[in-house]
Image (cartoon, coloured by chain):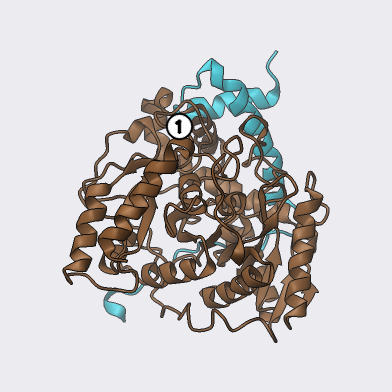
Chain colours: A brown, B cyan
Amino acid sequence: MTATAAAKAALARINAADYLLDAFITVTPARAMAEARAVEAGFVSGPLAGVPYALKDIFDSEGVRTTCHSRLREDHVPATDCHVAERLRLAGALLVGKTGTHEFAIGGPSFDLPFPPPRNPWDREHVPGGSSSGSAAAVAAGMVRFAIGSDTGGSIRHPAAYCGVAGLKPSYGRVSRRGAFPLSFSMDHVGPLGWRMRDVAEALAVIAGHDPLDPGSADLPVGDYLRDLEAGVAGLRVGVPRGWFAGAKGADPEALAAIDRSIALLREAGATVNDVTLPDFARFAAAGRVILAAEAFAVHARELRARPGDYGAIAFQRLALGATVTGADYVQAQRLRRELTAAVDDALARFDVLLTANVLIPAPRFDARPDAMAAGAPVQMIQFNLTGHPALAVPICLHSAGMPLGVQLAGRAFDEATLLRVGRTLEGLSGWEAMPHPRPR
Amino acid sequence: MASEDEHAFDMLMTRAGVAVDPARREGLLAAYRDLLAATTLLYAPGLGEAEPAMVFRPDPLGGV
């Protein structure tokens, strides 16, 4: 298929299904076709030549509005691309649109914003998760093979889990955040969501790398994420921090069964799987929530004072909350962060990867969703934003109610290749690789 | 009568200069109480007592 044909096909899929899903805030046919013509003319060539993708609408895109799904930036049109869009353009990828998010990547799903919230392609009455909601929905519905998201407390892995796609939060510093609207400077990560593990690996290979203009960017060699993707898991050691999720309040038995099934599959494939004891999840969550709240308030303080009514109710609540964090709280959270990071590093000295829960329930209905930011919420992803280790959402099966379930893998810092290898193995052994795209209903 | 944590909440919001619409106050106050409860975990004995964090370490001028 030519690049222009690929762009037209993706735009047609968006046109056919997005009126049901609201995955996109802005569709960019002119840019997609221009990038496709550049590929066909030979001006651009690369590993993603002619592959359409979508970009969460907190990432700057030259000449295309970047709203953060908020009234405050409804008409904001950046003059330049964000770093990941620059890299993807040079690799030949085609930007077909900007996807819906929680407001400023924290406030949602909301119905009091200028744009509707994205919906879950497996069932439109259910939330897609967030905050990279539209990116996950667009991938799950087959509009694009991969999309870019951001993850500060689980915002790639949460919608990936609810929508049944693969989603990777790389190591802190692996992918530049330049041109992405910040939420929490020390917790923000940028990464890909893909229909298949290979899509995630291919996208990561393009967007990973040092950027001197992002102070958090790591100047370290980029791994080969494709070489060992099909190598299997024989001989690998998998640790299971069962204490995090086994007795978690409100956990759906089928979600826990999906974890047990994944463990059994890895054992059958030759991995050694053992439980590992780590500090309580509540400690990770407490430190992560305090740091996130304080840093997000620092980003938004001026606008919260000047234009509080222009924020949606959920974003206002979660952002203004940071005003209540004291300096001592923030410092103590950073001290605890070092101890908890060391504990995870110790575990990963004995294990190649950790396998744990990501969400403890399947995607709930819009009218019955719990507060994902509250203590005891049925989501367990913020621990790896706190520690910076890479973490991957892997879809495994469908819940009896028809919504996806999966597991979370975490690995050593900058060893995304092993995570993707284990994820690819689970994708194959679980049978998820044969799962067709859902038809929005 | 406002409780002690409500007074603290109102003081912190006033100090921050953030005006809270009455329609949004109850939700934000509940979130504050939830975060306050989690914050106690940061001060648990034996955690973070000896370990300094975010220590500032300037690089010598000229890379000496």
Q: Which residue is mark 1?
A: A116
Say if B8 sits above or below A390 in the image. above
Mark 1 packing: few (<14 Cα in 10 Å), some, or many (20+)?
some
Instruction: State how many labels appear.
Output: 1
Q: Residue at x 52, y 52 (%)?
A: A140
**Where does the image place residue A102, in percent across and percent down from the top left?**
48, 40
Side of A80 relative to A392 (left or right): left
Side of A58 relative to A272 (left or right): left
Q: Residue furthest top?
A: B1
**Where does the image place residue A55, in percent across and percent down from the top left?**
38, 52
**Where does the image place residue A178, in percent across and percent down from the top left?**
33, 57
Circle 1: residue type: Pro
Q: Residue at x 63, y 74 (%)?
A: A425
Secondary structure beneath label 1: loop
Q: Is residue A28 visible?
A: yes
Q: Which quadrant is the N terminus of chain B positioned in?
A: top right
Side of A282 relative to A383 (left or right): right
Q: Is residue A58 visible?
A: no
Q: Which quadrant is the C terminus of chain B positioned in?
A: bottom left
Q: For residue A23, which quarter of the picture?
A: top left
Q: Nearer the viewer, residue A397 or A69?
A: A397
Say if A303 sits above or below A80 in the image. above
Q: Residue furthest bottom?
A: A235
Q: Nearer the viewer, residue A91 or B38?
A: A91
| Mark 1 belongs to chain | A
